[in-house]
Amino acid sequence: MEQLVAGEAAKLLGQARRVVIFTGAGMSAESGVPTFRDALSGLWQQFDAQALATPEAFRADPALVWGWYEWRRSAVGRARPNQGHVAVAAIEARVPNCVLVTQNVDDLHERAGSTAPLHLHGSLFAPRCSACAHPAPAPDGMAEEPAGGRRITPPRCTRCSAPVRPGVVWFGEALPEAALSAAVEAAATCDLLLTVGTSGLVYPAAEIPQVAARCGAAVIQVNPEETPLDHVADVNLRGPAARVLPALVE
Ligand code: BJW
Ligand code: ZN
């Protein structure tokens, strides 16, 4: 059964000329980077999103928030791309017009050879000033594991001396406009969208596969669990990205 469905997905992919690959935290799960909402290992099971991933949280306790993101940056620094990331880069190299759209704040797509992923939720590696948005270098030193809750005072902006903040998109914040509009445009004009490892719960990013489906594209989903995107997808491949994606590009 699974093989039949995977064969159908590989065929769709082989025929497509304009492809969008849309990825979420499940893409990096097998690299050891925790997802947000998985029942046992998700970050939001262990940590309070409101106290860490909002602009209000950073204003209230910048050292708590900065320390938590430094811990995550260091964990990602030690992680390696998995066979799923490698397969995504192989699809990009093969399809004439392929746009990679990721919600992930890690750099594992880039390290697997993807050239220019659109990062809808920013990056752990692009801190900026919380007041004037001037880019700041990511600090050299890495927080050590398992300091999940260690407070670290953020550096100050060299231009205006306000605290530097992580370059990620928190709840209640707008997504980077150029990346979002490029992603919507690509979704509206593709003939196949492959969605991988996302719960499809966070908006407006979760609209991307829906836009593609509405505009007539085929949608393939790779996820070991059911998601709200199941009914949007023409093909649901229920398995982990690092196993399912390489089989699509064999
Ligand atoms: C595998 C696997 C394997 C496991 N292989 N798969 C209703 C109520 C309240 C709020 C809202 C609402 N509707 C909309 C909102 C607003 C809010 C929102 O969507 N909230 C919902 C949660 C309800 N959205 C926002 O606030 C956004 N901004 C906004 O709307 O702005 C409006 C505005 C406009 C103009 C001016 C000002 C404002 C911003 C959202 C930002 C999200 N940020 C985060 C944190 C980033 C920083 C950080 O990393 O800390 O982004 S939250 C978190 O969720 C992160 C992710 O990118 C995002 C999506 O999660 P993802 O990737 O789907 O991961 P999971 O964990 O949810 O799912 C993993 C999946 O993988 C699962 O399905 C597993 O089964 C699967 N999996 N192993 C394949 N091996
Ligand atoms: Zn500044």
Image (cartoon, rainbow, N blue to C red):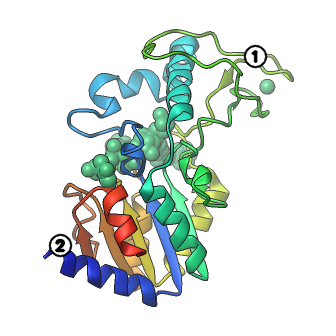
Q: Which residue is mark 2?
A: 2
Q: Position of residue 160 (x, y in %)?
A: 83, 20
- At 61% from the left and 19% from the top, the residue drawn is 142
Query: Looking at the figure, which quarter contains the N terminus?
Result: bottom left
- At 55% from the left and 26% from the top, the residue drawn is 74
Q: Amino acid at mark 2?
A: Glu
Q: Position of residue 157 (x, y in %)?
A: 79, 21
Q: Amino acid at mark 1?
A: Arg
User: In the rendering, which numbered label is found on residue 156?
Assistant: 1
154 relative position to 120: left or right: right
- The reply to whether discs 1 and 2 touch (Cβ–Cβ < 8 Å) is no
- At 53% from the left and 87% from the top, the residue drawn is 17
Q: Is residue 217 visible?
A: no
Disc 1: residue Cβ within 8 A of ligand 2's nearest atom: no
235 relative position to 175: left or right: left
Task: Give how far apart the Cα atoms at labels 1 and 2 are.
Answer: 53 Å
Q: Secondary structure at mark 2?
A: helix
Q: Position of residue 192 (x, y in %)?
A: 43, 80
Disc 2: residue Cβ within 8 A of ligand 1's nearest atom: no
User: In the rendering, which numbered label is found on residue 69?
Assistant: none
Q: Position of residue 164 (x, y in %)?
A: 70, 23
Ligand 1, image quadrant it occupies: top left
Q: Secondary structure at mark 1?
A: loop
**Which residue occupies the extreme right position in the image?**
159
- At 58% from the left and 59% from the top, the residue drawn is 180
Give the camera-side residue of 24 and 75. 75
Give the camera-side residue of 130 and 135. 135
Q: Quadrant of residue 213?
A: bottom left
Mark sitting earlier along the chain (1/2)? 2
Q: Quadrant of residue 15?
A: bottom left
Q: Quadrant of residue 224?
A: bottom left
